[in-house]
Amino acid sequence: MSLTSKSPRTVLLIAMDVARQALPAYAHRCSPKKFTQHQLFACLVLKGFCRTDYRGIVVMLSEWSDLREVIGLKVVPHFTTLQKAAARLLLRSEANRLLEATLTCADERSSSRAVTKLAAIDSSGFETRHISSYFVKRRDRDFKSRGIWQTTTYRPYPKLGLVCDCETHLVIAALPGRGPGADITHLDQVMVEGFCRRSIDTLLADAGYDAEWAHEFLRHDLGIHSIIPAGIGRPTARPPSGFYRRRMKQQFPNEIYGQRWQVETVFSMIKRRLGAALNAKTYWSQCRALMLKVITHNIMIICYVLWGFLQSKPVPFSFPCSGRHTARRVLRDATDVR
């Protein structure tokens, strides 16, 4: 599993570098020029890194002069300034540029090329409030004791779909939305974004993305070798309909598909280090908060690789997959499905 940095200083340094590649220094030529967009974005990344709110990060910056010196802050911004900066810098277009800048930053600081041999796609839900699972179970039990039928114990929740590199755990593309819903609905959009940023060789997905048009879209339009188990539909002895779905049923590469859980590791890293609950309330603010988590996740991985935090020697920008084989060796050995 990839490790992430625990140092706020290194996170701020990489966040500034990422912002310089993706954003201009000022949003307008007539702006007050009190803070640069690079400094405000670095403060937002630090807020997500420390899992606090806008008022909390202002207090931290006011008390820690070392952090202010890292990004050249002479005056601590007001918490409303950071809130407005998040609404402007984390829009869909700006957030995509920042996410792409994290991948560019990783490629420039490593010997690896911008090629992903093995990628995985999946989606996961996040909490909209800090509610314990114990309370949810007790609430469900009380409803049943009173004879009230309740099929679910949750409301519509924020949902994040992403494509990650199975070797480095970097997020290549991400699409925030709202669940519950089918995973396959965001396949085309998130894969087009990932295809524009990285050259992907093989994509792994679970049965939620099983469809003949998904294989045709990935293989014919994007040139990506797709591995998706044919698990949609009622159980039957007949072979699945469609050429690629039938091929997945007859010649499924189990060794390669065993690396699909790397995307589950990415979601676990995001939720454990950056939190599974969002402070945002509205739909668009939740989307911005999810994109900030994804960008911060990439920055934390780059920081760890560059400085070798918690280790006596630097580690290369390549993380071995668990199991008997690495992902690259499995791809080289199991080529009969192509």
Image: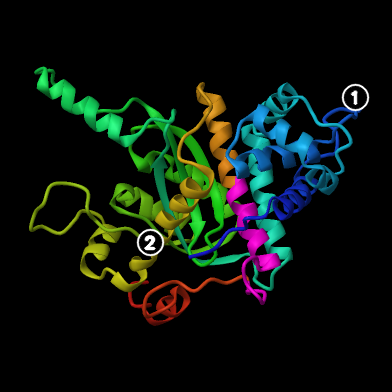
In the picture of the structure, the residue carrying the numbered disc 1 is 32
Badge nearest the viewer, 2 or 1: 1
Q: Which residue appears at 57% of the width and 39% of the height?
A: 51
Residue 275 at x, y percent in the picture: 49, 41
Circle count? 2
Q: Is residue 171 above or below residue 79?
A: below
Mark 2 or mark 1: whose residue is earlier in sequence: 1
> What segment carries the magenta color?
295-316
Estimate how packed mark 2 is, as few (under 14), some (14 to 19) or many (20 or more) residues with alpha carbons within 10 Å: many
In the picture of the structure, the residue carrying the numbered disc 2 is 260
Residue 212 at x, y percent in the picture: 31, 51
Estimate how packed mark 1 is, as few (under 14), some (14 to 19) or many (20 or more) residues with alpha carbons within 10 Å: few
- Determine contact: label 2, label 1, CB under 8 Å: no
Magenta residue check for 304 = yes
- Check disc 2 and give the amino acid type: Arg
Asked if residue 17 lies left or right of residue 306, the reply is right
Q: Which residue appears at 67% of the width and 74% of the height?
A: 314
Asked if residue 16 lies left or right of residue 153, the reply is right
- Check disc 1 and give the amino acid type: Pro
Q: Which residue appears at 65% of the width and 69% of the height?
A: 113
Asked if residue 57 lies left or right of residue 215, the reply is right
Query: Which label sits on residue 255?
Result: none
